[in-house]
Image (spheres, rainbow, N blue to C red):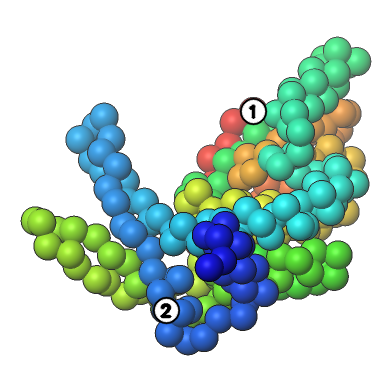
Amino acid sequence: MKPFAFIAGMAVERIVNADVGMEELASLSTLLLVLIHKADGGARPVAIANTKVRLAKAYALHLGGEVLMRIFEEDKLQHGAAPAGPERIVHTVKAAFSVDKENTAVLVSDISNAYNERSRAKMLSTLYSRPELRHLWRCADLIYASGPTQLVTRIDGINVVLETSCTTGAIQGCSIGGNLFNLAITEDLKVIQAKFKELTVLGLHDDITMTAHRRQDFGKLMEAAKVMKPVLFGQGSRMNMAN
């Protein structure tokens, strides 16, 4: 008899390689829907993936994670997934003010409901454009492009199965999804940085910090914000800004 660890390992490897049949795919794509009660009396629905799928995502990231981190390090735009990312942004902005406070301005923007509105097709196409991340391709495709998803929950003590299709959003708590989101955002930040070379553009997941280093460039911050909204999330997104 083969040990359980060996059998589980084989199952995880098959998921990473997308070597599963249609019946097994339906089982793997089924999510457990639970409600997390909030202090204000409301509730947040959270979908929990199959244990084998969660292990497969962790294994896929183990295979491609080092390359992924190197991409973020080299681009120097998206710091959400980089080590000490928040500290880097804080120190970069503080350094700019230390050099010339009177001629430095910062605009911080937050995209409302960013993780839910991000196009899955855009996230996957960005991933597939990176051959060095091929270890993540099949697992990501299995999770984010496999068609309808079944949600299992309990209502008044009765198990209820719901079926839904989703074309946007990174699954909450999904390690691969968060990295796909950051990877796609990085490509968009490149567009913004190339168009506004006078500014320093830094991302922390869905929080974008832009710094102008000359008084004559202060107006560029609002111009960049207007361009950034449709580039990142389309015309329907809402952006919260502070300066």
Q: Mark 1 or mark 2: which is in front? A: 2
123, above or below 213, in the image: below
Residue 238 in percent (x, y) is at: 50, 51
Q: Amino acid at mark 1?
A: Asn
23, above or below 37, in the image: below
| Alpha carbons under labels 1 and 2: distance apart | 47 Å
Residue at figure coordinates x 42%, y 79% from the top left: 26
Residue at the left extreme, as displayed: 156
Residue at figure coordinates x 76%, y 33% from the top left: 83
- In the drawing, does residue 120 fall left or right of residue 92? left
Residue 234 in percent (x, y) is at: 59, 63
Name the residue beneath numbered marker 1: 243
The kind of secondary structure element at disc 1 is loop
- In the drawing, does residue 87 fall left or right of residue 114? right
Q: Amino acid at mark 2?
A: Ala
Is residue 97 at least partly visible in the picture?
yes
Residue at figure coordinates x 60%, y 62% from the top left: 6
Badge count: 2
Name the residue beneath numbered marker 2: 26
The kind of secondary structure element at disc 2 is helix
Neighbours of disc 1 within 10 Å: few (<14), some (14-19), many (20+): few
Q: Quadrant of residue 221?
A: top right
Q: Are dots 1 and 2 in contact, CB under 8 Å?
A: no
Residue at the front extreme, as displayed: 1
Residue at figure coordinates x 76%, y 66% from the top left: 135
